[in-house]
Amino acid sequence: APSGRAPLPVLGRDVTVPLVTGGEVTYAALDYAASAPALQRVWDDVAAYAPYYGSVHRGAGHLSQLSTELFENARRTVAGFLDCRDGDQVVFTRSTTDSLNLLATALPDDCRVFVFETEHHAALLPWGSPRAVGRGARVTLLDAPDSPERAVRTLEDALAARDPRHPALVCVTGASNVTGELWPVRELAAAAHAHGARIVLDAAQLAPHHAVSLRALDVDWVAFSGHKLYAPFGTGVLAGRADWLREAEPYLAGGGASRRVARREDGGVDVQWHDGAARHEAGSPNVIGAHAVASACEALTETGFDTLAAHEERLIRTVRDGLADVPEVRFLSLFGDDAPRVGVLSFVVDGWNGSHFAAALSAEYGIGVRDGLFCAHPLLRALLGGAPHHGGECGDPGTAPGGTSPHAVRVSFGAGTPDEHVERFVRAVR
Ligand code: PMP
């Protein structure tokens, strides 16, 4: 039975770590937003299958056929998990970063990409990559909004001001990896479509906590990472409309993506590429990874996102109520402290460097959190540095806003978090 009211058992529940003060304590993993521990069930499913695996889409042997079936079943499970529409495609990638980079290589010529400056770098940077820019892509960074309504208005204004002859893509997060706040995805999708643009949802932080329906949200694509969704590392997903993907050059050139290869008279090579998901899955597929992601999708669906959300809501309240009378602790948010969010909270502590604070939580209490700028430098600048950052730069500024390195601390949790871990965190901060 899961301990401390955690809805699902995860790996690492019994890991103990030494404390500088002497003795040892059970490790409190409170960095789910970076990588969630794998579900015990996912691990068991992988272990049960492992002795039988063979190469996918390649071998004639029985185990190869079994693996091919498992891989394609995993694709169907993920399609169901995301409530895909007829004709949508599920492509297995390595991660959210990989998925968004793949989509960036599939932009139509001269595409205009609109992205809020508040995005994770994985959603901010691919559109400026050499392959995208070489095809004429141009990125417009949108100012950090102070409310969900403002986000929609900002997007509408930017899309209305663009030259409608260019195709356009909007990239938006479902839940912030810094503030945990939920973004108005359905409204942003409606705004994008009303202006003839497409939209991709970065669901890296949303999918582990909320049901994501391509149909209901009416987004064109969604990307997420297995390792944040209680599966092990190495597998991600890009799901959505097939047309841009079908018309694009393969993300990687190689076996599996190619249907027919022939030597030309002049010594060159003629290639016919596949049309389906295989077009962007060159190389031997990661069947274990896909199976693990599918197993996690099934476990979350069976447990129910209402149950998971209620658990997280309670833990969020434990943190907020437990630290409400500590004036030195300031939580970070764009939309207000009470805005709906997933189990991700970042804060600064007056008089403390965030790195030292996080190190002390680890060394003295056995608590693992994250500190820093969370691969979202412009957002941190907007949250910590006063005036939001304006302008086109979306590279790595290298230093914290203001140059002083205040570094925020982030605590995040989910389906496997027992109450005791969060209660210990509150005690430690106090
Ligand atoms: N988007 C968001 C919102 C994230 O939190 C992360 C991971 N921190 C990513 C994208 C990138 O995910 P990955 O590192 O698995 O590619």
Image (spheres, rainbow, N blue to C red):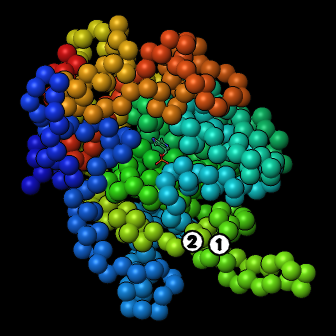
Label total for image: 2
Q: Quadrant of the N terminus?
A: bottom left
- Label 2–label 1 contact, CB within 8 A: yes
- Can residue 107 be seen from the camera position used here? yes
**Position of 263 relative to 250 (above/below):** below
Residue drawn at x 71%, y 35% is: 140
Secondary structure beneath label 2: loop
Between 292 and 89, the one lying in front of the other is: 292
Q: Name which quarter of the figure residue 26 lies in.
A: top left
Residue furthest to the right in view is: 266
x and y percent of residue 183 in the render?
Answer: 48, 37
x and y percent of residue 56 in the render?
Answer: 47, 79
Residue drawn at x 55%, y 12% is: 402
Q: According to the image, label 2 marks what residue?
A: 283
Q: Which amino acid does label 2 sit on?
A: Gly
Q: Is residue 157 left or right of residue 331?
A: right
Q: In this view, does 272 lie to the left or right of 335?
A: right
x and y percent of residue 79 in the render?
Answer: 45, 67
- Measure the alpha-carbon separation of dots 2 and 1: 6 Å
Between 151 and 321, the one lying in front of the other is: 321
Is the residue marked 1 within 8 Å of ligand 1, measured from its CB?
no
Q: Name which quarter of the figure residue 338 lies in.
A: top left
Q: Name which quarter of the figure residue 126 lies in.
A: top right
Q: Which mark is residue 254?
A: 1
Q: How crowded is mark 2: few (under 14 residues within 10 Å), some or many (20 or more)?
A: some
Q: In which quarter of the image is the C terminus?
A: top left
